[in-house]
Amino acid sequence: MRQCCATIAGFFLCAVVFAQTPLAPAPARRVVTVSAPSSHGNEPSIAVDPNNPTRVVAAFQPATIAYSTDGAQTFTTAELPPVEGWSGGGDVSVAFDNKGHAYLGTLHFDKLGSQSYWAHGAGRNGIFVRRSLDGGKTWEKDAVAAKAFQGNEPDIQWEDMPRVFADAQPHSPYAGNVYVGWIEWQLDESIILFARSTDSGKTFSKPMRISTHAGLPRDDNGGLVGFVGAVGADGTVYAIWNDGSTITFTQSHDGGRSFEPSRVAIEVAPPYFGGAGGIPGVSRVMGFPQIGVHARPGKNGGALYLVWSDYRNGDVDVFCVSSNDHGKTWSKPVRVNSDPIHDGIDQFFQWMTVDPASGEIYIQFYDRRDDPANRRTGFTLARSTDGGKSFVNYVWSDTLFESQNAFLGDYTWLVAYDRKVYGIWTEALPPSTDSQPPQPGRPQRSMTVVRVGFADFSTGN
């Protein structure tokens, strides 16, 4: 009995030591702030030009562009013309095509319908795409509406969460196509819409529905949420989203003209973490998925990867699965974060990218493993060089932050090229003595800034 207790104690001690072992910093780590401290910046996106990786474009809401010409070492804020007749702009995403043109997708609206049930009494709203021909320095004045409502239509719906991406594959028959997918909230259901451009973003096709199964009609568990797309070496377009407690998958083999019927890829836990499943100090967190493809030239499609986060282990963890048969079957989930399982520490708001040059998988996420109280938050980068079978975790952010009811947005973003990795995320600022007092009946909310991280694994790390 004494020997058994000693063994158990030894295991416990090893677990504690493992939990306290600090992560190595990401190699050549550099983190810069790209938003003004007073901007409440959040929901960022980032893209790198595959033709010239020194050109990097970052975006965040309210619709703001920061561009870099030195590989994300420094950034300059661009002058972004407003979408004529519309104010603001959110739910941003950016992408480069095969010609080095940059694209910005945004959501614009006058007012919400009602809390979470946005199509109920919806006002004017729309999805727009803008273009830059010089790596994000200047942006064309005219914006193309993928779909918009003027507010007086009898069948007005609510468009939401657009994701713009492009076919930059050198051997794809559809190289240069620009794609955008998003959610449409209707009074009785939610669906996923998709549009494509074959003229470098000058015009977009009539939106088509690509979700075979409709979701519930509000922004909550049961709705369709989190569209993300990726393009394989042969031009295959892959798309995913959350549908209830599943990740749904579809693909197009004709440059986005048509899609296979969407189907469940894998079962997951609910993507919204509210109520008892909430993250302390953060106003709202979701675990919706991303898809990536190892776009190897000469291969039909390439290996696919899905990443998401959920609380199947009690606390929130990040998971990855892979498919080598074009999404017909998927591997068992691999836990990406390397802290001990069931330790009561949350990792959340993950984002994944697959390096098109090396095929390595990179995943970033907010990480609270350095605070036993599960409040102070860091930012971690994970890397896999074996096709998602295992991951090494690295410290990316240089400080921990603690949020007070902060709105960090609904996503972060990550890209990589030739073992150089570029991530973007939101951090809460510490309370300021000159902060505005909270409105009556509303808790005080932390100010936020947007940070860009760079890491370089090209030197043999």
Image (spheres, rainbow, N blue to C red):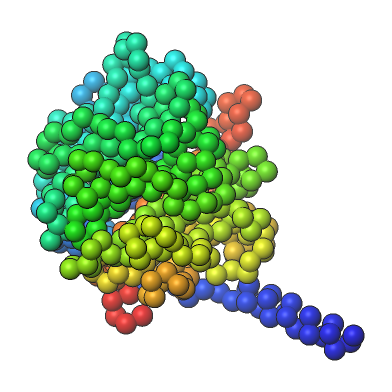
- Tell which of 123 and 269 is nearer to you: 269
Image quarter where the C terminus lies is bottom left
- The quarter of the displayed image where residue 200 is located: top left
Residue 96 at x, y = what percent?
19, 51
Residue 395 at x, y = what percent?
47, 68
Residue 156 at x, y = what percent?
35, 17
Q: Which residue is drawn at 50% across and 65% down?
A: 332
- From this viewpoint, is residue 353 visible? no
- Horizontally, residue 216 falls left or right of residue 211, namely right
Image quarter where the N terminus lies is bottom right
Q: Which residue is drawn at 52% across and 41% down?
A: 244
- Horizontally, residue 447 falls left or right of residue 30, namely right
Q: Which residue is drawn at 50% across and 21% down?
A: 114
- Horizontally, residue 13 falls left or right of residue 282, namely right
- The quarter of the displayed image where residue 86 is located: top left
In this view, 42 is above or below 108: below
Residue 397 at x, y = what percent?
45, 62
- Tell which of 441 and 409 is nearer to you: 409
- Tell which of 194 and 365 is nearer to you: 194
In this view, 387 is above or below 249: below
Extreme residue in the bottom direction: 3
